[in-house]
Image (cartoon, grey):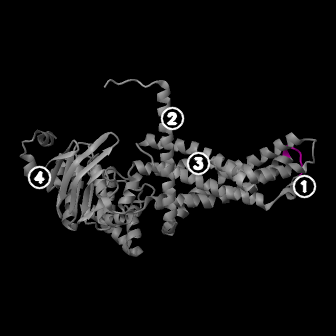
């Protein structure tokens, strides 16, 4: 039978259909790995050494960048709040605004976006390289469960360490806010602290920490999955790494909205 | 004994196995000879359950691998040592850690015994005092030896070799061939070697299977292969003579 070329609408419909099938297929594979992790979570203690290694990699090694970003976020928030509210309301309000903003949103979100690039890309590149060089096959051949050995420790480390980074980031961001307010915006430290004290609520800090747990989970699990499904050689690893950065950033902002809608 | 029966496997449109049959007898070294990219390595991975065939069965010591659960497969894998084409050493671990990984996880050896076992495995592949080195700092030939040491650390019954001499110079490749023969003699392992290197195949093999277009076109001893009138088989013999 002669081959008839498809019309443009048909081609678009086919492409759209394939995209939908690919998306749900991918989502199914991701959740099957998550399900496998949960089912075998009792084995996690056997890989405690890996978990500690990952906590160092994800946590300790990320402290400088999170603190740097947080300090500047605090300063910028203070300076811009002061600019927007100048002469309208008491200056202590700047302290309140900085505290609320960094605890609830800015530190958890911006740290997560930075770490999506740093931690997420590293995880995907590591696991992806292991995949294309048959190291994951070698693990299986040595009777290891590669998901419990490679992915579970990274995800657990993310869930534990991201909230800690958020707490450190919160402190430094408030210090940065106070520094920015006093040196650039001309607001006294006493006024800033007064506003901070008046507006502080423990739930705000706890909410940021909860966000940290979820962001830690989503970044490490998506990055691990992207690495685990790599095909081809170094090109495949490069593509997967790029996908990780894009997907984790998108997932973080969507998760941010969901958490704010549900918990606030 | 490993029995492969009527295996079919495709990847997308590409049919790589079309009803493959092969028997690997105990205490022998069986060599699968064939072109690169033909599906020989896939067959090795199927034997330990890393890849599932579309149809057919593979049995190891009478147990069907293709229907095993994950736990059963893990137990089966204790019987196997696998030397990967690029050695597949874990590049975040030292040579010593690569070898002791499985020992720590799957044996009751104490720390001292594990160190002794690592040294012993390295001595079998003619290496010493390399435990502290990282895989990135050793040569390709050494990587293969370390990969071999890792594979034999738990004294497997079967050894699977995926292109053991690919990418090595002639002298280093001869050294690996010698090691394969020594391990067979010293440890009594049953080996299945996948290669496209005819010279290497004739040095290590007891029985041979020629893999062409998704099937074995001939199996037999060295003499059977050398005297075969089959033009497809002759191609391999003549390529050996030329090299």
* Image side of residue B229 versus residue B28, left or right: left
**How far apart are the two marked residues, 3 and 4, measured between alpha carbons?**
55 Å
Q: Quadrant of the N terminus of chain B?
A: bottom left
In the image, residue A97 above or below residue A53: above
Judged from the image, the secondary structure of the residue bearing numbered disc 4 is strand
**How far apart are the two marked residues, 2 and 4, measured between alpha carbons?**
53 Å
Judged from the image, the secondary structure of the residue bearing numbered disc 1 is helix
Residue at image mark 1: A190
- Residue A16 circle label: 2
- Residue A152 circle label: none
- Front residue of B106 and B66: B66
- Front residue of B172 and A151: A151
**How far apart are the two marked residues, 1 and 4, measured between alpha carbons?**
91 Å
**How far apart are the two marked residues, 2 and 3, measured between alpha carbons?**
32 Å
- Comparing labels 2 and 4, the label whose residue is closer to the camera: 2
Q: Position of residue A97 (x, y in %)?
A: 83, 49
Q: Is residue A26 visible?
A: yes
Residue at image mark 4: B220
Chain letter for the residue marked with disc 4 in the picture: B
Q: Are marks 2 and 3 in contact (CB under 8 Å)?
A: no
Q: Quadrant of the C terminus of chain B?
A: top left
- Comparing labels 3 and 4, the label whose residue is closer to the camera: 4
Q: Position of residue B125 (x, y in %)?
A: 28, 61
Q: Are marks 3 and 4 in contact (CB under 8 Å)?
A: no
Q: Earlier in the sequence, mark 2 or mark 3?
A: 2
What are the residue bounds of the magenta stretch?
Answer: A183-188
**How far apart are the two marked residues, 3 and 1, measured between alpha carbons?**
37 Å
**How far apart are the two marked residues, 1 and 2, measured between alpha carbons?**
59 Å
């Amino acid at each position: 039978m002669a081959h008839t070329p498809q019309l443009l609408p048909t081609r678009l419909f086919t492409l759209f259909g394939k995209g939908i099938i690919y998306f749900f297929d991918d989502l199914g594979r991701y959740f099957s790995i998550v399900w496998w992790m949960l089912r075998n979570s009792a084995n996690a203690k056997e890989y405690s050494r890996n978990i500690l290694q990952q906590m160092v990699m994800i946590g300790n090694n990320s402290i400088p960048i999170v603190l740097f970003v947080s300090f500047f976020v605090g300063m910028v928030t203070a300076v811009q709040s002061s600019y927007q509210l100048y002469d309208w309301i008491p200056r202590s309000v700047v302290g309140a605004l900085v505290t609320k903003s960094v605890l609830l949103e800015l530190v958890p979100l911006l740290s997560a976006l930075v770490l999506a690039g740093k931690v997420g890309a590293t995880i995907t590149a590591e696991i992806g390289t292991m995949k294309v060089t048959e190291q994951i096959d070698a693990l299986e051949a040595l009777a290891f469960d590669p998901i419990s050995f490679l992915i579970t420790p990274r995800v657990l480390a993310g869930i534990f360490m991201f909230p800690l980074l958020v707490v450190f980031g919160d402190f430094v961001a408030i210090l940065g806010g106070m520094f920015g307010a006093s040196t650039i915006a001309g607001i006294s430290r006493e006024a800033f602290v007064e506003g901070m004290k008046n507006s502080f609520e423990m739930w705000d800090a706890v909410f940021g920490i909860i966000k940290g747990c979820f962001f830690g989970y989503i970044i490490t699990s998506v990055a691990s999955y992207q690495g685990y499904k790599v095909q081809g050689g170094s090109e495949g690893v490069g593509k997967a790494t790029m996908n990780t950065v894009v997907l984790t950033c998108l997932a973080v902002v969507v998760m941010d909205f969901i958490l704010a809608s549900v918990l606030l | 004994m490993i029995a492969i029966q009527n295996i079919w496997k495709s990847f997308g449109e590409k049919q790589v196995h079309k009803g493959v049959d092969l028997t690997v007898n105990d205490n022998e070294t069986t060599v699968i000879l064939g072109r690169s990219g033909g599906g020989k390595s896939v067959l090795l991975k199927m034997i330990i359950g890393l890849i599932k065939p579309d149809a057919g069965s593979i049995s190891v010591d009478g147990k069907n691998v293709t229907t095993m659960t994950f736990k059963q497969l893990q137990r089966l894998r204790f019987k196997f040592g696998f030397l990967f084409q690029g050695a597949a050493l874990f590049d975040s671990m030292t040579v010593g850690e690569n070898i002791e990984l499985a020992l720590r996880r799957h044996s009751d050896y104490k720390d001292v015994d594990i160190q002794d076992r690592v040294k012993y495995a390295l001595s079998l592949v003619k290496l010493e005092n390399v435990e502290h080195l990282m895989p990135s700092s050793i040569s390709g030939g050494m990587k293969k030896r370390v990969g071999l040491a890792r594979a034999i650390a738990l004294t497997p019954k079967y050894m699977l070799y995926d292109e053991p001499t690919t990418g090595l110079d002639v002298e280093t490749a001869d050294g690996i061939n010698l090691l394969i023969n020594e391990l067979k003699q010293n440890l009594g392992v049953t080996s299945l070697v996948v290669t496209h290197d005819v010279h290497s195949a004739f040095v290590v093999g007891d029985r041979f299977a020629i893999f062409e277009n998704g099937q074995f076109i001939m199996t037999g001893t060295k003499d059977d292969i050398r005297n075969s009138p089959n033009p497809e088989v002759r191609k391999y013999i003549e390529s050996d003579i030329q090299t």
